[in-house]
Image (cartoon, grey):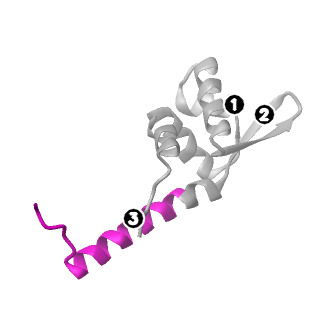
């Protein structure tokens, strides 16, 4: 059984500021102004990180007047969590079956 993990998504979430944004958005939908206040990041830096998260399918936007609200897409996170759960299950099965390749 081949188990793969979405390495592109891991790279996206590996950035500390992006992970902080994702953590904040897991609790509530926020606009850019709120995220600047919460993270202390500069507006332009934050916008770049939000673009990366949006392009990766991790967040979605909702225009509201002159503001843009960001919402976490839980399916993207759940998919990655499922991939890690599959990897853990494969490792558990390998350990229980004591599978190992013999050395040449």
Circle nearer the N terminus (2, 3): 2
The residue tagged with tag 2: helix, strand or loop? strand
Q: CA distance from mark 2 to mark 3?
A: 37 Å
Label 3 Cα crowd, 10 Å radius (few <14 / some 14-19 / many 20+)? some
Q: Nearer the viewer, residue 101 or 42?
A: 101
Name the image quarter holding residue 34. top right
Q: Residue 23 location in percent, x, y?
A: 53, 47
Q: Name the residue: 57% across, 60% down.
A: 79
Find out whether the residues at labels 2 and 3 contact each other: C-beta distance under 8 Å.
no
Q: Nearer the viewer, residue 1 or 18?
A: 1
Q: Residue 40 location in percent, x, y?
A: 53, 25
Q: Residue 49 location in percent, x, y?
A: 59, 29
Q: Which quarter of the rendered picture does the N terminus lie within? A: bottom left
* Label 2 sits on residue: 68
Over which residues does the magenta segment extend? 80-104
80, above or below 91, in the image: above
Circle nearer the N terminus (1, 2): 1
């Amino acid at each position: 059984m081949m188990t793969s993990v979405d390495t592109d998504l891991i790279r996206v979430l590996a950035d500390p500021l992006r992970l902080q944004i994702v953590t904040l958005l897991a609790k509530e939908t926020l606009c850019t102004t709120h995220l600047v206040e919460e993270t202390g990041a500069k507006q332009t830096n934050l916008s770049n990180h939000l673009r990366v998260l949006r392009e990766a399918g991790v967040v979605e936007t909702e225009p509201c007047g002159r503001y843009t609200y960001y919402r976490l897409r839980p399916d993207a996170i759940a998919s990655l969590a499922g991939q890690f759960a599959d990897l853990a299950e494969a490792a558990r099965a390998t350990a229980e079956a004591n599978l190992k390749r013999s050395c040449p």
